[in-house]
Every structure is written in C-alpha cells, then in structure tokens.
Image (cartoon, rainbow, N blue to C red):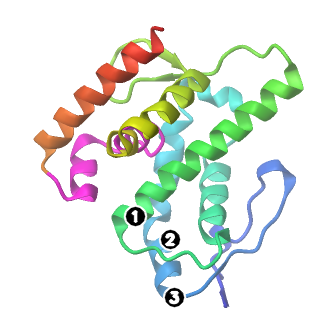
C-alpha cells in the first residue's frame, strides 16, 4: 500500500482522532487529489446555515469523507460518478453521526435545519430528511441517489447530469418527482 503524502488529506481532526490514509492504487489517490477542492466546496455548501450547529468544519468533513472512502477495504472506485455518489453517501453518514452525537450530548438539542438546494423555500429538519431519504432508497434508489447528490454533495442539476451521463432535462424531471415525494413524506 502506498501512503498518501499530501498533508491536506492525511489527518482528520474530526472527533479528535487522527487517521493515516492509505490507498491500493495511485489511481485512487489521484482521483481524490483531483477532486479534493470539490470535496471542500461541497462540504462548505452542506454546512452552510443551520448545519453549522453540528460543530464540524468543512475541512473536517472533507477529511473525514476522504478517510472513510479509503478506509473501506480495497474499494474500487470505478469512475467519477461512483466517486461523487460515494462521497455524497459518506458525507451524509458523517453528518448524521455528528448530529446524533450532538443530540446525545445535549439531550433536547434543537433540530438542525438545512435548505432545499438552489431554492428559496423553507428549511428542513436534517434528521427528518435523512429518514425520508432512507425510505426513498427502498422505493427508488436512483432518485434517492439524486437527492443525496443535491443535498449532501451540493451538486447542481447540470453537474448531476454530467456525473450520471444523462441530460439536464432528465435530471430536472427526476428531481421534481423526488422533491414532490420528499415534500409529501415530510408533511406526514
């Protein structure tokens, strides 16, 4: 195994733990290094607004996500699509773990809210969104991945279309359907 030498991705201060990142192939390392700035941009976007209550910094989220990706036993990252989808899922897991930790420490901590991506609509409780997204994964994994990419990876419709290899109009149509389902589920 080749250790990653870039100091930007070697340690993660999240939860006061330090980890050493190792990868199986230089291609995986190159993929992470090539997208690290995007990782941090996404983390900043995810942590905007009320999510800042989670007491996690964008750099910490990016580091933790990078570490988790390469901590998976001999993961085979096949493409940029796979990498970004995996990143969104891992950032979601990290945020939810941090939210649970915060709630456990404070017992009655107020809800952490997030905004609909790219829209001026009202806020959503992050835990409610996670529960609804878990249900959507059972019903329609493709739309659930799209929601993860919008909320937790901060990708635009155009970026998702590029990542998924589909047209922006298809992604918009899928987003409208997923959004309508989420609204219905969250109003229950």
Q: CA distance from mark 3 to mark 1?
A: 17 Å
Which residue bears the numbered disc 1?
A: 82
Q: Is residue 79 above or below residue 61?
A: below
Measured from the top left, where is residue 45 in percent x and y? 48, 39
Secondary element at image label 1? helix
Neighbor class of circle 2 (other Cα within 10 Å; few <14, some 14-19, many 20+) is some
Look at the picture and state if 135 lies above or below 71.
above
Q: Residue at horizontal 48%, vertical 8%?
A: 188
Please name whichever residue, 141 or 46, is drawn nearer the observer in this view of the structure. 141
Of circles 1 and 2, the one toward us is 1
> Residue 37: image x %, image y %?
47, 60
Q: CA distance from mark 1 to mark 2?
A: 12 Å
Q: Residue at label 2?
A: 32
- Sequence order check: which comes first, mark 3 or mark 1? 3
Quadrant holding the N terminus? bottom right
Q: Position of residue 175 (x, y in %)?
A: 26, 33
Instruction: Give how far apart the Cα atoms at labels 2 and 3 are.
Output: 10 Å
| First of labels 2, 3 by sequence position | 3
The front one of 31 and 104 is 104
**Nearer the observer, disc 3 or disc 1?**
1
Mark 1, other Cα within 10 Å: few <14 / some 14–19 / many ≥20:
some
Magenta-tinted stretch: 146-166
Q: Mark on residue 26?
A: 3
Q: Is residue 41 magenta?
A: no
Q: Quadrant of residue 70?
A: bottom right
Check contact, mark 2 vs mark 3: CB within 8 A.
Answer: no
Residue displayed at 66% across by 37% down: 96
Q: Is residue 67 left or right of residue 25?
A: right
């Amino acid at each position: 195994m080749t250790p990653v030498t870039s100091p930007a991705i070697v340690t993660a201060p999240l939860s006061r733990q330090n980890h050493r990142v190792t990868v199986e192939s230089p291609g995986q390392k190159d993929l992470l290094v090539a997208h690290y700035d995007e990782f941090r941009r996404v983390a900043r976007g995810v942590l905007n607004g009320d999510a800042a209550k989670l007491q996690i910094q964008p750099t910490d989220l990016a580091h933790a996500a990078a570490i988790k990706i390469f901590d998976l036993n001999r993961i085979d990252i096949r493409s940029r699509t796979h990498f970004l989808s995996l990143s969104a899922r891992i950032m979601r897991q990290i945020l939810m773990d941090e939210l649970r930790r915060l709630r456990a420490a404070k017992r009655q901590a107020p809800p952490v809210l997030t905004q609909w991506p790219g829209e001026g609509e009202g806020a959503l409780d992050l835990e409610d969104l996670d529960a609804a997204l878990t249900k959507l994964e059972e019903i329609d994994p493709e739309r659930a991945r799209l929601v993860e990419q919008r909320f937790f990876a901060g990708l635009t419709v155009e970026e998702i279309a590029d990542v998924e290899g589909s047209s922006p109009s298809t992604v918009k149509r899928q987003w409208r359907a997923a959004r309508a389902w989420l609204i219905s589920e969250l109003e229950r």
